[in-house]
Amino acid sequence: MATDKELNDFLKSVDRRAFKRTAYLVRDDDGALDIVQDAMIKLAEKYFDRPAAELPLLFQRILSNATMDWFRRKKVRTAVMQNMSDFESNDPDSDFDLMQMLEGQEGALGALSAADEVSRVQILQAIEAEVAELPERQREAFLLRYWEELDVAETAIVMGCSEGSVKTHCSRASHSLAKSLKAKGITL
């Protein structure tokens, strides 16, 4: 079993080499520092009861695994999350519409069948008709909040009412729409 001093001396002796090695691998100094620190912490927490002679090999294995985990997380992060600036064009006069771009991608990935497209259009028409049937203030609050994506305070200013009224109108509109659409067999 390694003593605290042996563990500390070992970690001090490998920290620079481990950082350089990891920095060369991941090409990111901050990421490399995080990886090395995580590996050191894991060694100290999980393997403190091992003999000092086993620490170098254990640490190298932990560091390798931590590096591979970092690459996996990075791959997932870049696959799932894309920087919004990646979508913008260099032309300052262009109007970028994320929803339009995503609709184009969705259609390209797996085009809907004709029946699915007709069904989708019918559902959208039914929703639009139900929104049109809402009382004026509910419809206005609903569209400002969920279509124009204004927050409660901004909607209250536009409608000239209190934030509580906006919340009430939106709640009533949402419940009314859900009830009428459910009666038509449409669940969202």
Image (spheres, grey):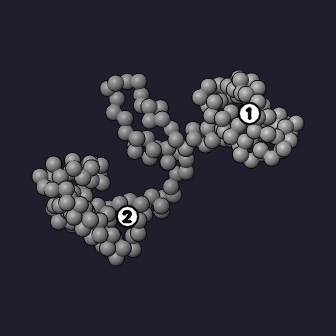
Image height of 58 relative to 166, above or below: above
Say whether residue 18 is visible. no
Location of residue 150 in the rendering, given as x and y in whole percent from the top left corner: 26, 48
Q: Secondary structure at mark 2?
A: helix
Question: Which label's residue is closer to the chain start, 2 or 1?
Answer: 1
Location of residue 151 in the rendering, given as x and y in whole percent from the top left corner: 27, 49
Name the image quarter holding residue 118.
bottom left
Q: Nearer the viewer, residue 147 or 46?
A: 46
User: Which residue is disc 2 drawn over?
Assistant: 123
Image height of 48 relative to 152, above or below: above
Q: Residue at x 50, y 55 (%)?
A: 112
Q: Nearer the viewer, residue 16 or 139?
A: 16
Relative placement, left or right, of 50 versus 24 is right
User: How many other residues sit within 10 Å of disc 2, few (<14), some (14-19) or many (≥20)?
Assistant: some
Name the image quarter holding residue 123.
bottom left
Name the image quarter holding residue 84.
top left
Q: Identify which amino acid the numbered label 1 is placed on.
A: Asn
Which residue appears farthest toward the right when viewing the image?
A: 53
Q: Nearer the viewer, residue 131 or 108?
A: 131
Q: CA distance from mark 2 to mark 1?
A: 66 Å
Q: Secondary structure at mark 1?
A: helix
Q: Identify which amino acid the numbered label 2 is placed on.
A: Ile
User: Which residue is disc 1 drawn over?
Assistant: 8
User: How many other residues sit within 10 Å of disc 1, few (<14), some (14-19) or many (≥20)?
Assistant: few
Q: Residue at x 45, y 44 (%)?
A: 102
Location of residue 129 in the rendering, given as x and y in whole percent from the top left corner: 26, 64
Relative placement, left or right, of 137 versus 102 is left
Image height of 110 relative to 69, above or below: below
Mark 2 or 1, which is nearer the eye? 1
